[in-house]
Amino acid sequence: MHTGRAPTRAALTAELGVTRATAGAVAAELESLGLITVDSRPGAASGTQGRPSHRLAVDPDGPVVLAAQVHADGYRAALVGLGGHIVATAPGSGTAAADPAQILGEVVASGARLLESTGRRCVGAGLAVPSAVAEPEGTAINPLHLAWEVGAPVREIFTRALAEARISGPSGDETAPGYAANDINLAALAEHRHGAGRGARHLLVVGTGHRGVGGALVLDGRLHTGSSGLALEVGHVTVDPGGRPCHCGSRGCLDVETDPLAFLEAAGREPGPEVSLLERAEELIRTEYDSDPAVRTAVETLIDRLGLGLAGLVNILNPDRIVLGGLHRVLLETDGERLRAVISGRSLWGRSGSVPLLPSSLAHNSLVGAAELAWQPVLDDPLGTLTR
């Protein structure tokens, strides 16, 4: 139901490999938990034969999770229902303070106001941060574009903020459980379950949001995070050995050569304090690409750098699909032919033309991914999680 594979009770029966009666009992149980709805008067689809099947749908008034995202330009909170549907969202503003407890407290307070205004039941909370998050400790190992100390215990701070805001969990008597992970990893998880990556076996997602570049890999439906949650730091693939100094100590990494700040500098524009770097870069491309040679050249420069990095990743990972997010999505939409040509010319597998290159399709995919963290216990054991 969560990923759209069971729109009818007949489809649920096939997915589970059980009898019609068992599938009906499962559907009734999920309906009693307030997770789905089952139509009482099934009808056959036009042109079909045989007994009509009950239609199943995510309950539009069902429980939600609180999803939070922190980035270099501020934060955003949202309520996300089953199926990855954003029910309500409240953007934050300003930059992330040096004390993570301050901004995490603010984003949780924003989410608490959403819960109060909507009256929805909360069953968990997930947080997306622009840093690798070490497991099992839940610490931010490299918050390069935030003023946080290395090793900030973000999951612990997030959970404490949930308790202080009195956000209840599945039972209603305890604090909502809090989870935290890297933002691009969560974007990949969301795109694989609900977006442009749906159906891919080996999905590579690369994107740049407000600062820096991240990447993630979904293998056979599971997010690849390595031995301790730190895998696939693609932002530190070198694409210009003589390029800009990178926060990691190297030079010319994707992180500093293909993010919004790099684009604005290449186009000869000042970042400006009025809007986020990402919004400024995207607006510049959409409004001045056709009229300003400097903007066009900057787009071509970033596409060439990005293509070089992607070609190396294709050679190593051999994905069956690549999804680009943030500014990289805009670059693909602006001149996808050039980007595909760069990858093809630099990649053995790219020459075969067998690696689809797609723009991300979800708005706020890192937020949706943060919600996936919080929904996972319910997906694993709905009855045990919601009735204990």
Image: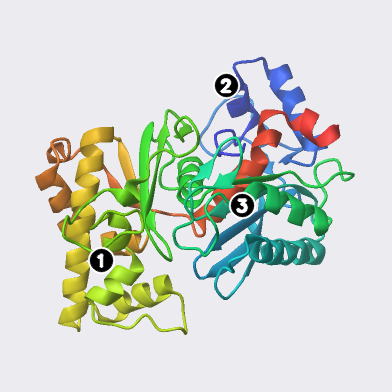
Q: Which residue is mark 1?
A: 334
**Residue type at tag 1:** Thr
Q: Secondary structure at mark 2?
A: helix
| Residue 275: image tag | none
2 vs 3, front mark: 3
**2 or 3: tag closer to the N-terminus:** 2
Is 44 rendered above or below residue 366? above
Is residue 318 visible in the rendered image? The answer is no
Q: Is 285 displayed left or right of 365 in the figure?
A: left
Q: Residue at x 24, y 34 (%)?
A: 316
Is residue 256 visible in the rendered image? The answer is yes
Q: Which residue is mark 3?
A: 127
Task: Tell me the quarter of the image containing the N terminus.
Answer: top right
Q: Residue at x 20, y 53 (%)?
A: 239
25 or 219, which is in the foreground? 219
**Residues at marks 1 and 2 touching, judged by CB atoms closer than 8 Å:** no
Q: Which residue is mark 2?
A: 14
Residue 215 image position (x, y, % from top left):
38, 47
**Residue type at tag 2:** Ala
**Residues at marks 1 and 3 touching, judged by CB atoms closer than 8 Å:** no
Q: Is 336 displayed left or right of 345 in the figure?
A: right
1 vs 3, front mark: 3
**Residue type at tag 3:** Leu
Looking at this rendering, what residue extends furthest in the right direction? 173
Residue 192 image position (x, y, % from top left):
46, 41
Is 136 rendered above or below residue 69? above
Q: CA distance from mark 2 to mark 3?
A: 34 Å
The 10 Å Cα crowd at callout 1, few under 14, some 14 to 19, many 20 or more, is some
